[in-house]
């Protein structure tokens, strides 16, 4: 699968590539691979070839051409859509997301992004409060509440007892996520088996093999402001 090329209008220092850590996975709305109107794969722009895929047409998400700031997003229906791939990402690691929850119903979690290998080991979820949470055996719950139909960006650090969460560049909480398990890959839009589906639009998803510095988060925040108006 060919790797999409980042637009030359954006120098590498203004993209997720120009940080102290190189991403191990990076997908953006404009790197989705569409066949007959649905997304069968989301191309990994990191160069690692970790493309989340979905072979079942009925479970494939769609692209929203003007999803945010005139840029495309990938939309999951909250019923059965998801994309997944497997790889190993040891703690500590950071997952970065630009996303919008379209609806939240019921008390159970809706997994925006989850593990690609071991079912239920790690997830970034939203519940019907709505709250943004990280999960790996136990919950680390953000104290804030983030409404439906609003794009936000998140920095989620999995680092056992020192895990942490930022929303829109603002620190939310630090604490334990219940274990030091490695991620077995990535699933977007649901758990690895397709349950706990999220009605979500994702503009960008990035994995880093470590903890971002303050300068890294500041640079990414500037990139998200430039690219998405956030």
Image: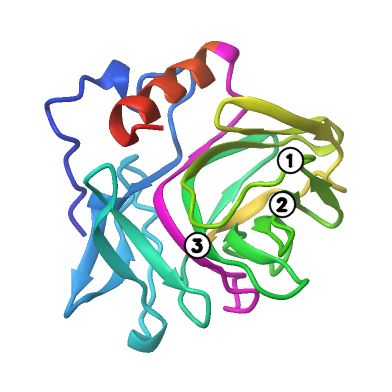
**Between marks 3 and 1, how big is the CA–CA gap?**
23 Å
Whether residue 123 sits left or right of residue 11 in the image: it is right
Residue with the mark numbered 1:
144
Image quadrant holding the C terminus, namely top left
Q: Residues within 10 Å of mark 3 (few under 14, many from 20)?
A: many
Q: Residue at x 75, y 35 (%)?
A: 159
Q: Residue tagged by mark 2?
A: 131
Query: Are the residues tagged 2 and 1 within 8 Å (C-beta)?
Result: yes
Image coordinates of residue 222 in percent, x first then y, are 40, 20
Cα distance between the residues tagged 2 and 3: 18 Å
**Which residue does the numbered mark 3 point to in the structure image?**
188
Whichever of labels 2 and 1 marks the residue nearer the N terminus, that label is: 2
Between tags 2 and 3, which lies in front?
A: 2
Read off the magenta span: 188-214
Gap in Å between the C-alphas at discs 2 and 1? Answer: 7 Å
Q: Quadrant of the N terminus?
A: bottom left
Q: Is residue 15 above or below residue 54?
A: above
Secondary element under disc 3, as helix, strand or loop, is: strand
Residue at 23% x, 64% y: name it.
33
Q: Is residue 212 magenta?
A: yes
Q: Nearer the viewer, residue 220 or 120?
A: 220
Q: Residue at x 26, y 21 (%)?
A: 12
Q: Quadrant of residue 39?
A: bottom left
Task: Report whether residue 41 is seen.
Answer: yes
């Amino acid at each position: 699968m060919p790797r999409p090329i980042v637009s030359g209008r954006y120098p590498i220092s203004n993209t997720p590539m120009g940080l102290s850590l190189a991403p191990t996975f990076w997908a953006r709305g404009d790197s989705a691979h569409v066949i007959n109107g649905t997304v069968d794969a989301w191309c990994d722009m990191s160069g690692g070839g970790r493309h989340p895929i979905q072979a079942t047409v009925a479970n494939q998400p769609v692209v929203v051409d003007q999803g945010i700031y005139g840029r495309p997003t990938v939309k999951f229906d909250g019923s059965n859509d998801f994309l997944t791939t497997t790889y190993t990402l040891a703690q500590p690691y950071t997952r970065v997301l630009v996303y919008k929850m379209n609806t939240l119903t019921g008390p159970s979690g809706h997994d925006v992004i989850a593990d690609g290998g071991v079912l239920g080991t790690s997830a970034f979820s939203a519940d019907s409060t709505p709250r943004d949470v990280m999960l790996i055996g136990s919950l680390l719950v953000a104290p804030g509440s983030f409404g439906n139909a609003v794009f936000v960006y998140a920095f989620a650090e999995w680092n056992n007892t020192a895990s942490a969460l930022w929303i829109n560049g603002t620190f939310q909480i630090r604490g334990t996520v219940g274990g030091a398990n490695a991620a077995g890959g990535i699933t977007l839009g649901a758990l690895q088996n397709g349950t706990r589906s999220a009605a979500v639009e994702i503009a960008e998803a990035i994995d880093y093999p470590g903890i971002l510095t303050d300068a890294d988060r500041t640079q990414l925040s500037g990139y998200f402001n430039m690219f998405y108006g956030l």
